[in-house]
Image (cartoon, coloured by chain):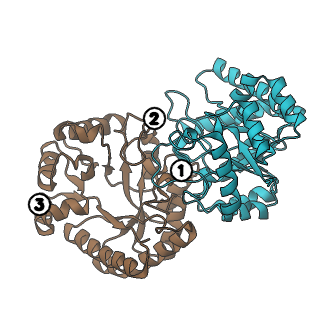
Chain colours: A cyan, B brown
Amino acid sequence: MTSPNLSLNLATVRRQYGFADAVEECLRQGISAISPWRDQVQAVGLAEAARIVHSNGLRVTGLCRGGMFTAGDAAERQAAIDDNRRALDEAAELGADCLVYVVGGLPTGSRDLAAARSIVAEGLAAILPHARANGVPMALEPLHPMYAADRSCLTTLSSALDLCAELGAGAGVAIDAYHVWWDPDLEAQIARAGREGRILAHHICDWLVPTTDLLLDRGMMGDGVIDLPKIRRWIEAAGFSGPQEVEIFSANTWWQRPGPEVIATCIDRFHSVC
Amino acid sequence: MTSPNLSLNLATVRRQYGFADAVEECLRQGISAISPWRDQVQAVGLAEAARIVHSNGLRVTGLCRGGMFTAGDAAERQAAIDDNRRALDEAAELGADCLVYVVGGLPTGSRDLAAARSIVAEGLAAILPHARANGVPMALEPLHPMYAADRSCLTTLSSALDLCAELGAGAGVAIDAYHVWWDPDLEAQIARAGREGRILAHHICDWLVPTTDLLLDRGMMGDGVIDLPKIRRWIEAAGFSGPQEVEIFSANTWWQRPGPEVIATCIDRFHSVC
């Protein structure tokens, strides 16, 4: 069985596999789309990662991640911008559909969310020409509001689309069900994202009840409460037909299981739940 | 020193004090406004609690809490509505400014947030006549989106105000900085809440970085990242001049400290931070 509409974000098996072994197991189980993290690519080397991708005809639904613009001082912000240019180069070499952006939270010592959002907008504007030149769309990922302080001052799909409108061509959004499922405005904003041509990626996992850790207790599809088929229908109705990308950070459950079992479970749940 | 603009939500000292002792310590330290929880009132008895309130001239900025409408079946939902009528009676006897509503999350086994929101709207409409007859405003409290599954399908101030508009007179909102600080639309929605005459309560505490527990790791004002003075200015500019109510659930820090120290710290931080 192949699963052409399923992509595996390699963070899901980061404790089990390096890049090459993760790809090998994906291919063995019929998955031909992946989304790696930069540290995973760097561990094997960019050239070798690109060779593995291209020689196997893999689709790369995204490279994770750019962003983290809200460093403390001007020098650190410039370093972040420079690093984001390198991330775009890596995404281009991998032929990724997009570079996924987690934009950063409050600068250290700051309580000013509006200022953080301005820093993010400036950082994105600074690298946009490089993204356009490389042909790599920038996928802004609004994160769940519980990450507003330390990971992403961009907390809603609505505000991400507003930012895309400011930036213009080359910017879009990654819609991750885990981050946005709670939003009463979600259906309308997904439709808007489609109208404005902004949907670049569709991530899935599940919200567990209870959730015991803010970062590392994400659930396998079907084990939580997110209505994933409904969100998929909204996204498809908005015109996005790319793979759904499974991304599960799970320190105590899935990162503890054997890699083949995790991938097999992702496939099974994808077909039975999503 | 007295603190006429400070109210203590008695959950903040629920491990240290019963109702009567909490009030005694508040008065000793110059706090004359409180917000008790129903279990705290019931433990001392409603009549005795009301006697303590009225004989001391206390302001009760709210009774916590009504809501939890999204029970599984029709009988349970009716039981929730009946219980909410009793809560309104208790709030009236205490002379509370409002009854605070935490509306409930997804019904057990359901993934349908829209349906949950409809159940909530129906439950609130069912008790609204009783609230109006008792003269107790219903304060809908949008909770942080991390509680969408298990506590409150009402996740934004905007959607709470939409619901108030459907309900009409007798409904309003409790704005808790902890629940809404991340919202990019917060300033606009607070202004709207003021224009529409809906602000009934203003709760404060702080968002800690890191936050180690989704429910019981709220911070003392000044220990986290919320810009409380900015939110206060927005709320005051919107026309609400009632006390700020400190509500801190803190299993491992403040619930472990001596009650007089906790209350003294609330007062100190209120005057120096908020």
Chain of the residue under label 3 = B
Specify whether disc 2 shares its chain with disc 3: yes
Q: Is residue B238 above or below residue A100?
A: below
Which residue bears the numbered disc 1? B187
| Observer-nearest of B191 and B80 | B80
Nearer to the camera, B226 or A241: A241
Identified by mark 1, the residue type is: Glu
Q: Amino acid at mark 3?
A: Ile
Residue at mark 1: chain: B
Q: Residue at x 84, y 24 (%)?
A: A47
Residue A87: x, y in percent? 77, 28
Which sits earlier in the primary sequence, circle 2 or circle 1?
A: 1
Residue designated by label 3: B52
Assess whether mark 3 and mark 2 are in contact (beta carbons under 8 angstroms): no
> Does the residue at mark 1 contact the one at mark 3 (Cβ under 8 Å)?
no
Between the residue at mark 2 and the residue at mark 1, the CA separation in whole angstroms equals: 25 Å
Q: Which dot, 2 or 1, sits closer to the camera?
A: 2
Tell me if A226 is positioned left or right of A40 in this view: left
Label 2 or label 3, whichever comes before in sequence order: 3
- Neighbor class of circle 3 (other Cα within 10 Å; few <14, some 14-19, many 20+) is some
CA gap between label 1 and label 3 equals: 38 Å
Residue A113 visible at all: yes
Q: Position of residue A10 (x, y in %)?
A: 69, 38
Instruction: Indicate the quadrant where residue A124 lies.
Output: top right
Q: Which residue matches tag 2?
A: B210
Circles 2 and 1 in contact, beta carbons < 8 Å? no
- Packing grade of label 2 (10 A; few <14, some 14-19, many >=20) is few
User: Which of the marked residues, 1 or 3, is nearer the chain's N terminus?
Assistant: 3
Q: Numbered disc 2: what chain?
A: B
Q: Amino acid at mark 2?
A: Pro
Q: Residue furthest top?
A: A75
The span from disc 2 to disc 3 (Cα, nearest Å) is 39 Å
